[in-house]
Image (spheres, grey):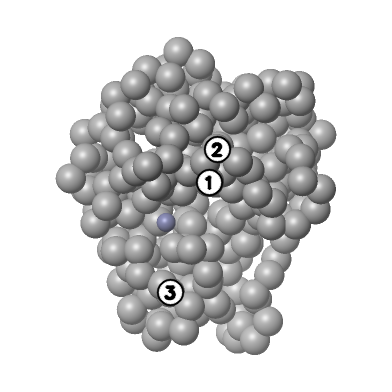
Amino acid sequence: MRPRGPLAGAAVAAVLLTGCGGLSGPAGPSDRPPLPSTRAAVPPVVHQVQTRDRVVFLTYDDGAERDPRFVDLVRERRLPVGMFLTDSVAGPGYGHFARLRSVGASIQNHTLDHTALRGLPYAGQRAEICGQQDKLRARFGIRPRLFRPPHGRYDATTLRAAADCGIGAVVLWRAAMGADGRLSYTEGPPRLRPGDIISLPSGDPTGLTLVERTVRLLREIEGRGLRVGRLEDYL
Ligand SMILES: [Zn+2]
Protein backbone atom coordinates (compact mmCIF):
# COMPACT_ATOMS: atom_id res chain seq x y z
CA MET A 1 0.00 0.00 0.00
CA ARG A 2 1.32 3.43 -0.90
CA PRO A 3 -0.36 5.97 1.35
CA ARG A 4 1.01 8.84 -0.70
CA GLY A 5 3.06 9.39 -3.76
CA PRO A 6 3.31 12.65 -5.63
CA LEU A 7 3.48 14.80 -2.53
CA ALA A 8 6.54 12.97 -1.40
CA GLY A 9 8.86 15.19 -3.39
CA ALA A 10 7.84 18.26 -1.46
CA ALA A 11 8.61 16.52 1.75
CA VAL A 12 12.21 15.93 0.92
CA ALA A 13 13.36 19.49 0.79
CA ALA A 14 15.11 19.15 4.07
CA VAL A 15 17.51 16.43 3.20
CA LEU A 16 20.86 17.45 4.51
CA LEU A 17 23.66 17.54 2.03
CA THR A 18 26.86 16.82 3.81
CA GLY A 19 30.23 15.60 2.86
CA CYS A 20 29.91 16.93 -0.66
CA GLY A 21 32.71 19.44 -0.43
CA GLY A 22 35.51 18.77 -2.81
CA LEU A 23 33.49 16.72 -5.22
CA SER A 24 34.62 17.35 -8.73
CA GLY A 25 33.13 16.73 -12.10
CA PRO A 26 29.74 17.65 -13.43
CA ALA A 27 26.70 15.94 -12.06
CA GLY A 28 24.53 14.26 -14.64
CA PRO A 29 20.91 15.24 -15.06
CA SER A 30 18.87 13.66 -12.32
CA ASP A 31 15.72 13.20 -14.35
CA ARG A 32 17.02 10.71 -16.82
CA PRO A 33 19.38 7.75 -16.72
CA PRO A 34 23.01 8.69 -17.11
CA LEU A 35 24.73 7.90 -20.34
CA PRO A 36 27.83 5.75 -20.03
CA SER A 37 30.01 8.76 -20.64
CA THR A 38 28.35 10.94 -18.00
CA ARG A 39 28.52 10.79 -14.26
CA ALA A 40 25.41 10.01 -12.25
CA ALA A 41 24.18 12.72 -9.91
CA VAL A 42 25.70 12.51 -6.44
CA PRO A 43 22.99 11.25 -4.07
CA PRO A 44 21.84 13.37 -1.13
CA VAL A 45 22.82 12.24 2.37
CA VAL A 46 19.64 12.12 4.41
CA HIS A 47 19.58 12.20 8.21
CA GLN A 48 15.92 13.06 8.52
CA VAL A 49 13.03 13.87 6.25
CA GLN A 50 11.34 17.23 6.57
CA THR A 51 7.63 16.60 6.47
CA ARG A 52 4.51 17.72 8.23
CA ASP A 53 3.20 14.17 8.09
CA ARG A 54 3.33 12.60 11.50
CA VAL A 55 5.58 9.79 10.34
CA VAL A 56 8.88 8.32 11.38
CA PHE A 57 10.89 5.70 9.53
CA LEU A 58 12.15 2.39 10.90
CA THR A 59 15.38 1.13 9.40
CA TYR A 60 17.21 -2.06 10.37
CA ASP A 61 20.85 -2.68 9.63
CA ASP A 62 22.99 -5.68 8.72
CA GLY A 63 20.45 -8.52 8.82
CA ALA A 64 21.91 -10.59 11.63
CA GLU A 65 18.63 -11.38 13.40
CA ARG A 66 16.21 -13.58 11.54
CA ASP A 67 13.38 -14.14 13.97
CA PRO A 68 10.17 -15.38 12.31
CA ARG A 69 8.22 -13.46 14.96
CA PHE A 70 9.58 -10.27 13.45
CA VAL A 71 7.95 -11.23 10.13
CA ASP A 72 4.68 -11.74 12.02
CA LEU A 73 5.02 -8.34 13.69
CA VAL A 74 5.70 -6.54 10.40
CA ARG A 75 2.72 -8.27 8.80
CA GLU A 76 0.30 -7.79 11.67
CA ARG A 77 1.17 -4.15 12.26
CA ARG A 78 1.61 -3.43 8.54
CA LEU A 79 5.01 -1.84 9.11
CA PRO A 80 6.75 -0.53 5.97
CA VAL A 81 10.21 -1.02 7.48
CA GLY A 82 13.48 -0.69 5.56
CA MET A 83 16.02 -3.50 5.84
CA PHE A 84 19.58 -2.39 4.99
CA LEU A 85 21.30 -5.69 4.32
CA THR A 86 24.97 -6.67 4.33
CA ASP A 87 25.53 -9.74 2.19
CA SER A 88 28.08 -11.43 4.42
CA VAL A 89 25.71 -11.08 7.40
CA ALA A 90 22.26 -11.49 5.89
CA GLY A 91 23.18 -13.68 2.93
CA PRO A 92 22.70 -17.06 4.61
CA GLY A 93 19.21 -15.96 5.57
CA TYR A 94 17.93 -14.19 2.48
CA GLY A 95 14.85 -16.44 2.60
CA HIS A 96 13.84 -14.69 5.81
CA PHE A 97 14.19 -11.29 4.13
CA ALA A 98 12.19 -12.46 1.13
CA ARG A 99 9.39 -13.29 3.57
CA LEU A 100 9.76 -9.88 5.16
CA ARG A 101 9.60 -8.26 1.76
CA SER A 102 6.43 -10.17 0.95
CA VAL A 103 4.73 -8.64 3.99
CA GLY A 104 5.73 -5.06 3.26
CA ALA A 105 9.40 -4.51 4.18
CA SER A 106 11.78 -3.01 1.67
CA ILE A 107 15.26 -4.34 0.97
CA GLN A 108 18.10 -1.81 0.77
CA ASN A 109 21.89 -1.84 0.41
CA HIS A 110 24.36 -1.95 3.35
CA THR A 111 27.42 -3.26 1.40
CA LEU A 112 28.79 -6.72 0.73
CA ASP A 113 31.04 -7.09 3.77
CA HIS A 114 30.35 -4.18 6.13
CA THR A 115 33.76 -2.75 5.31
CA ALA A 116 34.45 0.73 6.68
CA LEU A 117 34.35 2.75 3.47
CA ARG A 118 35.71 6.16 4.41
CA GLY A 119 39.20 6.57 3.04
CA LEU A 120 39.11 3.52 0.79
CA PRO A 121 39.95 3.99 -2.89
CA TYR A 122 37.11 4.32 -5.36
CA ALA A 123 37.43 0.78 -6.74
CA GLY A 124 37.09 -0.79 -3.30
CA GLN A 125 34.10 1.34 -2.34
CA ARG A 126 32.41 0.70 -5.65
CA ALA A 127 32.95 -3.06 -5.28
CA GLU A 128 31.27 -3.01 -1.85
CA ILE A 129 28.25 -1.05 -3.04
CA CYS A 130 27.76 -2.31 -6.60
CA GLY A 131 28.58 -5.84 -5.48
CA GLN A 132 25.67 -5.76 -3.05
CA GLN A 133 23.40 -4.24 -5.70
CA ASP A 134 24.24 -7.25 -7.87
CA LYS A 135 23.63 -9.73 -5.05
CA LEU A 136 20.27 -8.21 -4.20
CA ARG A 137 19.25 -8.13 -7.82
CA ALA A 138 20.18 -11.80 -8.22
CA ARG A 139 18.31 -12.80 -5.07
CA PHE A 140 15.33 -10.47 -5.01
CA GLY A 141 15.16 -9.11 -8.55
CA ILE A 142 15.58 -5.53 -7.34
CA ARG A 143 18.23 -2.83 -7.43
CA PRO A 144 17.79 -0.78 -4.26
CA ARG A 145 17.75 3.02 -4.49
CA LEU A 146 18.75 3.53 -0.86
CA PHE A 147 22.15 2.87 0.69
CA ARG A 148 23.51 3.12 4.21
CA PRO A 149 27.30 3.04 4.66
CA PRO A 150 28.56 0.81 7.50
CA HIS A 151 28.81 2.74 10.77
CA GLY A 152 27.25 5.71 8.96
CA ARG A 153 30.70 6.76 7.77
CA TYR A 154 31.41 7.88 4.26
CA ASP A 155 33.40 10.35 2.19
CA ALA A 156 33.08 12.04 -1.19
CA THR A 157 34.33 8.87 -2.88
CA THR A 158 31.49 6.92 -1.26
CA LEU A 159 28.95 9.27 -2.76
CA ARG A 160 30.50 9.03 -6.20
CA ALA A 161 30.63 5.23 -6.04
CA ALA A 162 27.06 5.08 -4.75
CA ALA A 163 25.89 7.25 -7.64
CA ASP A 164 27.66 5.02 -10.11
CA CYS A 165 25.94 1.99 -8.56
CA GLY A 166 22.49 3.52 -9.09
CA ILE A 167 21.91 4.72 -5.53
CA GLY A 168 19.43 7.59 -5.24
CA ALA A 169 19.94 8.54 -1.58
CA VAL A 170 22.40 7.76 1.21
CA VAL A 171 20.32 7.19 4.33
CA LEU A 172 21.69 7.92 7.80
CA TRP A 173 19.58 8.59 10.90
CA ARG A 174 18.83 11.04 13.69
CA ALA A 175 17.76 8.44 16.25
CA ALA A 176 19.24 5.02 16.99
CA MET A 177 17.97 2.33 19.34
CA GLY A 178 20.58 0.35 21.21
CA ALA A 179 20.39 -3.26 22.37
CA ASP A 180 19.04 -1.97 25.69
CA GLY A 181 16.02 -0.48 23.95
CA ARG A 182 17.03 3.13 24.57
CA LEU A 183 16.97 5.74 21.85
CA SER A 184 19.91 8.07 21.35
CA TYR A 185 19.96 11.09 19.06
CA THR A 186 22.74 12.41 16.87
CA GLU A 187 21.45 15.98 17.03
CA GLY A 188 18.43 18.05 17.94
CA PRO A 189 15.89 17.45 20.69
CA PRO A 190 16.06 14.05 22.42
CA ARG A 191 12.56 12.94 21.47
CA LEU A 192 10.95 11.56 18.35
CA ARG A 193 9.53 14.08 15.93
CA PRO A 194 7.98 13.88 12.45
CA GLY A 195 10.41 12.86 9.74
CA ASP A 196 12.84 11.10 12.04
CA ILE A 197 14.77 8.20 10.60
CA ILE A 198 15.39 5.61 13.30
CA SER A 199 18.19 3.08 12.99
CA LEU A 200 18.08 -0.28 14.73
CA PRO A 201 21.53 -1.84 14.35
CA SER A 202 22.13 -5.51 14.95
CA GLY A 203 21.53 -6.14 18.61
CA ASP A 204 23.86 -7.38 21.27
CA PRO A 205 22.84 -11.03 21.82
CA THR A 206 22.50 -10.31 25.51
CA GLY A 207 20.17 -7.41 24.87
CA LEU A 208 16.57 -7.18 23.77
CA THR A 209 15.47 -9.00 20.64
CA LEU A 210 14.53 -7.13 17.52
CA VAL A 211 10.87 -7.87 18.22
CA GLU A 212 11.16 -6.55 21.76
CA ARG A 213 12.97 -3.43 20.64
CA THR A 214 10.47 -2.81 17.86
CA VAL A 215 7.47 -3.25 20.15
CA ARG A 216 9.02 -0.83 22.62
CA LEU A 217 9.69 1.64 19.84
CA LEU A 218 6.15 1.35 18.46
CA ARG A 219 4.82 2.19 21.89
CA GLU A 220 6.91 5.35 21.97
CA ILE A 221 6.00 6.26 18.37
CA GLU A 222 2.30 5.85 19.01
CA GLY A 223 2.56 7.63 22.32
CA ARG A 224 3.73 10.70 20.41
CA GLY A 225 0.90 10.45 17.92
CA LEU A 226 3.24 9.31 15.17
CA ARG A 227 3.08 6.36 12.79
CA VAL A 228 5.58 4.42 10.70
CA GLY A 229 6.01 5.71 7.15
CA ARG A 230 7.58 4.18 4.08
CA LEU A 231 10.90 5.85 3.41
CA GLU A 232 10.78 5.31 -0.35
CA ASP A 233 7.64 7.43 -0.50
CA TYR A 234 9.66 10.40 0.75
CA LEU A 235 13.04 9.94 -0.94
ZN1 LIG B 1 25.81 -2.03 9.87
Q: Residues within 10 Å of mark 1 (few under 14, many from 20)?
A: some
Query: Looking at the image, do the residues carrying marks 2 and 1 touch, with CB atoms under 8 Å apart?
Result: yes
| Left or right, residue 48 beside residue 35 | right
Residue 103, above or below 85: above
Residue that badge 1 annotates: 178
The numbered mark, 2 or 3, whose residue comes first in the sequence reads: 3
- The residue depicted at 49 percent of the width and 51 percent of the height is 146
- The residue depicted at 33 percent of the width and 79 percent of the height is 124
Q: How crowded is mark 3: few (under 14 residues within 10 Å), some or many (20 or more)?
A: many
Mark 3 within 8 Å of ligand 1, using the beta carbon: no
Residue 41, above or below 85: below
- Give residue 120's quadrant in the image: bottom left
Q: Please, what secondary structure does the residue beneath circle 3 have?
A: loop
Residue that badge 3 annotates: 117
Q: Residues within 10 Å of mark 2 (few under 14, many from 20)?
A: many
Q: Spot the residue most to the front.
A: 206
Name which residue type carries label 1: Gly
